[in-house]
Amino acid sequence: MAMQAKINRVLLLNPPSKVFIYPDGQPAHRKHCTPPIGIAYLAASALKHGYEPILVDSVVEGYDNEWFIEPFLYYGLDTKAIVARVAAAKPDLIGISVLFSNIIKEVFEVCAALKAEFPDTPIVLGGHHPTGAAAECMKNPNVDFVVLGEADVTFVQLLDSLNGKLPLADVPALYYRENGAVKSTMDGVKAAVEGEGWRYYNRKDAGIPVELDPLPFPAWHLLPIADQRERPRGNSLAAR
């Protein structure tokens, strides 16, 4: 991937969702669309530092669009619609939030379609699944970066780095590639709590903001909140 000279316009995507359908046709749960607070926080931080964020909540924007691939009912913007949305926005970088492991396969399919259409546009994954399985996510050639934990600060540092303001190696809690090899700025950082598996949130210097007061409130104005209010909602969980 040839990095672009300037990163300014940043598109952050909440991917489509799905519902498991039992053999008798009953859904495991109802459709819902939870306001994507994670990308709203990242957008606010990017905006504060002079970048131009664009938020695409594919769940609420395509809530009535459904397709069935056994045993799941999918809803939201499909891959073709997401590619069209990105083409219209013309971003310099694409970030995708992956909160749950059960959608990583579909996210990888979106990444493949986006990379085929926009080969020089960096793709960044964040959220619970990439945080816990960053090395696995980086095995996918269509993923350029993974940011770990709550990336309000580190995401902006990544943008700054891609604009030549600091080396990638100085961005905390980041997975990236260098000469084709996957690198992590967490290498050598001792875990605050020793263990295997999902341990990144327990690591020191894991990119989680220490000072909360300087962080801006979520950029709700960049989302179709009026449409959100008309749909069934789940819970927004936060650690703050």
Image (cartoon, helix red, strand yellow):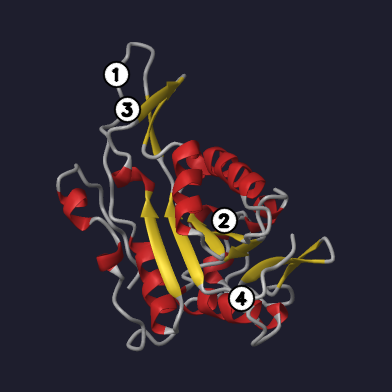
Which badge, 2 or 1, comes first in the chain's sequence? 1
User: Badges 2 and 1: C-beta atoms under 8 Å apart?
Assistant: no
- Judge the density around disc 4: few (<14), some (14-19), many (≥20) Cα neighbours within 10 Å: few
Q: CA distance from mark 2 to mark 3?
A: 25 Å
- Looking at the rendered structure, the kind of residue marked 3 is Ala
Residue 25: x percent and y percent?
32, 14
| Residue at image point 33% right, 65% down | 238
Which badge, 2 or 3, comes first in the chain's sequence? 3
- Looking at the rendered structure, the kind of residue marked 1 is Gln
Which residue corresponds to mark 4? 6
Which residue corresponds to mark 2? 130
User: Badges 1 and 3: C-beta atoms under 8 Å apart?
Assistant: yes
Tell which tag, 4 or 3, sits nearer the viewer: 4
Q: Nearer the viewer, residue 107 or 21?
A: 107
Which residue corresponds to mark 3? 28
- Looking at the rendered structure, the kind of residue marked 4 is Lys
Identify the element where label 3 is drawn.
loop
Which residue corresponds to mark 1? 26
**Quadrant including the N terminus:** bottom right
Q: CA distance from mark 4 to mark 3?
A: 45 Å
